[in-house]
Image: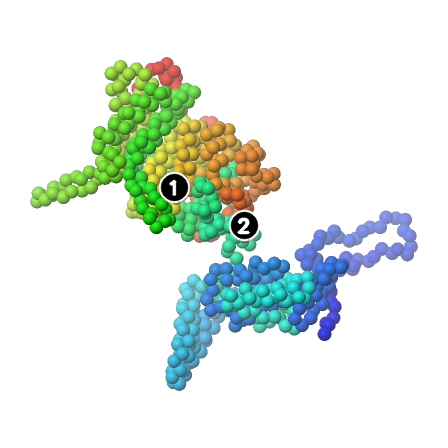
Amino acid sequence: MLTKMKKLFTRNKASSNVEAPQHGNIKLEKEIDLRDLTFPSMMENLTNDGITFEKDHFEIQTGLGDVKFGRSFFIKPSGYPRTVRIGWLEGLFTGDDMDVSVHIEPLDRNSAIKKLQKKIDEFETVVHSAANRNEGAKIEDAMQKRDDAKYLQRQIKNNQNGLYYVSIQGTVFASNLNDLNAKSREIERILGGESIEIINSYGRQKEGFLSCLPLGKNHLEKTDRNLDQNALTAIFPHASSKLNHIGGFPIGRFGSEYVYYNNFDASLSNYSMGIFGVSGSGKSVLVKQIIGRGFMDGIMKNVIIDCEPEYIALTKALGGIVIPIYPSKSKTASRINPMDIFPEREIINPGEENEYTVERINLNFKVIELLEFFTVMKESLSPDSRGLTPIEIGVLSDLLEDLYTKRGITEDPESIYLNEEDIDLNGKITYRRRKIDMPTISETYERLVKLRDDGDYELKELCTIVHLFTKNKAFGLFDGQTEIISDSGVSLDDAPVVTFDISKLSPNGIERPLAQHVLMTWVWNRFIGSNPKVKKRVIIDEAWMMIKYKTMMEWLKTLSARGRKWNVSLTLVSQRYEMFDRTEAARDVVAQFATVCFLQQSDQDIQPILDTYRLSEDVGNMIRTANKGDVIMKAGKQIVSFRSEPTPEEWNYLNTNQNIEMGTGPGKKSSREAQIQFLNMAVDIKAIEGEGVA
Ligand SMILES: Nc1ncnc2c1ncn2[C@@H]1O[C@H](COP(=O)(O)OP(=O)(O)O)[C@@H](O)[C@H]1O
Ligand SMILES: [Mg+2]
C-alpha cells in the first residue's frame, strides 16, 4: 500500500559545489568564504518536510511533529454544467484550506475554427443518420449542438470569442482522514448544486498535488476540456469578500478580486461621496471610471462641473452634452439663470404599494436658495466677507417672492407654463406650451435701485454689489434667461452625462466658485428635484475652490443631506483635505459623507483625515505611501483598499488630462484674471467707503 517516502523539493544544492573548507588542518589565515549570498526562492518557500502519496489521498509533514492529510481532485471533463453563470465556481474558491488551480491553454483562432468545423460536420452526420432512423430526440439534440458550434465558430471568426483548453483542479487539506473525507463530501455536494461533477485524482495524487502548486504546470493529463471565453471569464471570483454590498459595480481590484461597490447600498446612511488625494494621485481617473461603470448599476444621469476641462472626452464618449459657461456678449454662449424655478417631484411611500408622486413648485425654498445666492455675492465682494444684513434679507425675500407671484407662479407646476398663440399664413391659430420668462438679476437690481431711490438708503451697498452681477458687468454671466447652446444632438433630459465646462472662468477671485455654486443649485433644481426616481450623480471636481465661501459650504451640506431623498450621490473631488478641516462649515460637509476615498495624501492632510474618519495609523501610512491609483475607501463602517485599474477601452477617454496645476503662479496671470482681481479689490475699497462703483 505505502508508496515510498519522497522529498519533493530539496534545497538549492548549488552552494555544495563549492569546495568545503578543510577542517582537518587548522589554518591560521582567515578563510575566504566563496559562497554567494542567497535568498529563499519561491521553490524553497514551497519546500515541505516530506509527503507520502496513497492512491486516493496523501499525508504531508507540515512541521517536525505535524501531519496533514490532503486529497487532489479535478472537475470531470464531462462534468461541467451546460450553461454557466458568473461565479459558478465560487464553491471551490470559498472553501477553507483548499488550493485550486485553473490551467488555461488558448487555442489559436485558425485551429479553433477548424476544430469547430470538424465538430459541426460530425453533428451534421449524426443529424443525417438519426433522420434516416427517425430518432426525433436525437435529431434535436444534435441540431442544437451543431447550431451552438456554428454560433461559436462565427463569434471566433469575428474575433468576439475564443476557445481554450481548461483544466480545473483542487487539493483539499484536513488534519485527519475522517475530516478529509467529510470535507471532500461537502465539496462534492456544493459543486453538485451547480451541476459540476468532481472526481478524485485516483492513483495520481502526486500529479494532482503538483498541479495545484503555483508552478503553472498541469501534471494531470486528460483532465481538460474546451471552454469558450464567456464560460472562462465566469470562472473567476467576481464577488468581493471585502465590501458586503448588494449589487454595485467593480470599482477596483484587490489582489485577484474585484471590489464591488454600491453607492446606493442600504447600509450607507447617505449617498454622498468624497474623493481626496494630492494633485496627480488619480482622483479624476477614479471618478471617471465611477461614472463610466455606474451605468451598469443603473446610475443613468451624471452632471459634472468641470474646471479643467478634463471631462470633455468622457462626456462625448458616453453620448453626453458639454455646455461651456463663460462671459460672452455673443448669442452663441450658453447661460444659466440662477432664478429659474422648476417643479419638484417627491415620491411618497417609496417602494410601497401605495407609492405615488407629488409635483409642486416650492417657492419658499426657491427664495431661501436665492437669499443664499445673494449672500454669496455679498460675502465674496465685501471686505471681511460680510453676509446680508437683517434689513437686506427682509427686503430681498419680499422682493424675490413678488417677482415670482406677480408672474402668476404658484405651487401648481402648470403655473410656470403659458400657451402661446401661433398664427400661420392661413390665419389658423395653434397653441404652443412654453415656459414663462423667469425673473433675472437685472430685474432684481432694478427693484433694489427703485427702493434705494425711494429712500431706503440701507440698500446702497447691496445695490452696488448686485450691479456687478448684471449683464455686461464684471460678473454678469448669470444675468438673463437660461440659454443652452450645444453642438450635441441629445437633449438635456436624455443625455447620460451633462458637463458644464467652467475652465474659461478665472480660478482666482470669485468667478469660478460662484459658477460652481450657481451651477450646483441650478443642476439640483433642473435634474435632481424634478427626477427623484432615477439614480444620479453630481460631480464637483476641485471642490477646494469653494471652501473659502462659507455659504457655499453650508449649501453643499444641505444638498448632500437632501441627496438620499432624491436618489443622488453628491460626489466631491478635491486635493488638500486639510483645507476642509480648517473651517467648520467645510468640515461638516466632508465629515458627513458616508463614502470617502483616499488616494495619496501629503503629510499635512493625513492627521485630519485619521481624526475625522477615525482611521488607524496604518491607514495613515498606506495613504502616505500610496502609488498613483491606490485607494483606501471607507464606505459606511467598512474599509477596503483597492487599485483603480482602468481597462484599455476606458483609457481612451480617461487620460486626456491637460494637467493644469493649481493656480497659475506669479507672472502667469492672464490680463482678464488680473482685471477681475483688480475689480475685486476696487469693490472692497469702495464698499468700505460706502460708494457705488459704477
Ligand atoms: N489608476 C491609475 N493607473 C495608472 N495611471 C494612473 C491612474 N490614475 C491616474 N493615473 C495617471 O496619473 C495622471 C493624473 O491622474 P488624475 O486622475 O488626473 O489625477 P488628479 O485628478 O488626482 O490630479 C493620469 O493622467 C494618468 O496618466
Ligand atoms: Mg483631477
Residue 561 in the image: above or below residue 463: below
Residue 34 in the image: above or below residue 401: below
Q: Position of residue 252 (x, y in %)?
A: 50, 49
Q: Amino acid at mark 2?
A: Lys
Q: Position of residue 423 (x, y in %)?
A: 12, 41
Q: Are marks 1 and 2 in contact (CB under 8 Å)?
A: no
Q: Quadrant of residue 207?
A: bottom right
Q: Would residue 678 be seen by someone viewing this image from the given angle? A: no
Q: Residue furthest right?
A: 25
Q: Position of residue 3 (x, y in %)?
A: 72, 72
Residue in view at x 54 percent, y 52 percent: 241
Q: Which residue is mark 2?
A: 242
Which color scheme is applied? rainbow
Q: Is disc 2 placed on a helix, strand or loop?
A: loop
Comparing labels 1 and 2, the label whose residue is closer to the camera: 1
Q: Quadrant location of the C terminus? A: top left
Q: Residue furthest left?
A: 426
Residue 240 in the image: above or below residue 481: below
Q: Is mark 1 within 8 Å of ligand 2?
A: no
Residue 329 in the image: above or below residue 255: above
Q: Residue furthest bottom?
A: 133
Labels 1 and 2: the sequence-earlier one? 2
Q: Amino acid at mark 1?
A: Lys
Q: Is residue 95 left or right of residue 60?
A: left
Q: Quadrant of residue 15?
A: bottom right
Give the tally of numbered discs. Answer: 2
Give me the disc on residue 565. 1
Query: How crowded is the residue under tag 2: few (<14 C-alpha within 10 Å), some, or many (20+)?
Result: some
Residue in view at x 29 percent, y 33 percent: 363
Residue in view at x 83 percent, y 57 percent: 20
Q: Position of residue 416 (x, y in %)?
A: 24, 37
Residue in view at x 69 percent, y 56 percent: 45
